[in-house]
Structures are given as structure tokens and as C-alpha cells.
Image (cartoon, rainbow, N blue to C red):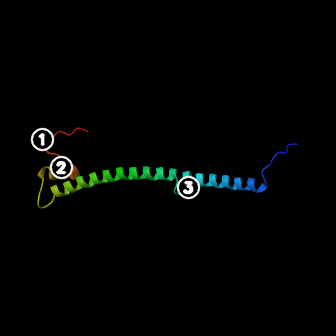
């Protein structure tokens, strides 16, 4: 007579616990606070902030140039004229305004 061998309850419990822990750690590695998805989100946010920083650096450089051109040491009369017209809304008599 042949007798089938069934695994004991301890072996089944061991494999269930091992499987559950494997699933938990796999989930944590993918979607946890330090998982792959969070890492991709952080990289995308870093890239967006780097682009914003580059834009702000360009704006700062432009504003520094305009400030230097209107300083006491170096006065750009064309820029001063442009700024005065923009602020005061005035034009010369020989100019034509197109809106």
C-alpha cells in the first residue's frame, strides 16, 4: 500500500510566512517611502526644479545687466529713455505708435 506524504502544518505555516514577508518587502521596495516609484518622483521633481532654477538664473542675469546699465557708474541713455517712456507713457513728436 502506498501512502501519500502530506506536508505538516509547520511547513505550510513556514512557507506562508515566508511568502507573506516576500510580498511585503517587494511592495515596500516598489511603492514604499524609499521605493522605486518615490525615487522616480524625486528625480522628476529635481529636474523640474533645475529647469526653474535655470530660468531664474537667466532672469537674475538680465536684471543685473539692466541694473548695471542704469547705475551711476555706467548710464545707458537708450535704456533710460526706454524706461522713462514706459513708465510715463510718453512718445516724441516724430514717433508713430502702433497698437
Residue ranking furthest to the bottom: 72
Residue ranking furthest to the front: 1
Q: In front: 80, or 26?
A: 26
Element type where label 1 sits in the image: loop
**Residue 23 spot, x, y in % from top left:** 63, 51
Q: Quadrant of residue 53?
A: bottom left
Residue that label 2 marks: 82
Q: CA distance from mark 1 to mark 2?
A: 15 Å
Q: CA distance from mark 3 to mark 1?
A: 69 Å
Q: Nearer the viewer, mark 2 or mark 3?
A: 3
**Residue 57 spot, x, y in % from top left:** 28, 54
Q: Which mark is residue 6?
A: none
Q: Nearer the viewer, mark 3 or mark 1?
A: 3
Above or below 7: residue 98: above
Upstream in sequence: badge 2 or badge 3: 3
Residue that label 3 marks: 32
**Residue 56 spot, x, y in % from top left:** 31, 53
Upstream in sequence: badge 1 or badge 2: 2
Q: CA distance from mark 2 to mark 3?
A: 56 Å
Q: In front: 88, or 16?
A: 16
User: Is 8 placed left or right of 56 in the picture?
Assistant: right
Residue that label 1 marks: 94
Would you say the residues marked 1 and 2 are in contact, meaning their CB atoms lie under 8 Å apart?
no
Amino acid at each position: 500500500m502506498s501512502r501519500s506524504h502530506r506536508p505538516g502544518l509547520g511547513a505550510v505555516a513556514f512557507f506562508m510566512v515566508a511568502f507573506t514577508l516576500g510580498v511585503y518587502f517587494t511592495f515596500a521596495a516598489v511603492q514604499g517611502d524609499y521605493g522605486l516609484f518615490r525615487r522616480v518622483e524625486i528625480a522628476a521633481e529635481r529636474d523640474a526644479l533645475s529647469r526653474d532654477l535655470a530660468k531664474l538664473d537667466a532672469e537674475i542675469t538680465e536684471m543685473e545687466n539692466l541694473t548695471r546699465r542704469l547705475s551711476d557708474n555706467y548710464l545707458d541713455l537708450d535704456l533710460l529713455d526706454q524706461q522713462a517712456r514706459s513708465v510715463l507713457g510718453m512718445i516724441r513728436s516724430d514717433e508713430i505708435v502702433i497698437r
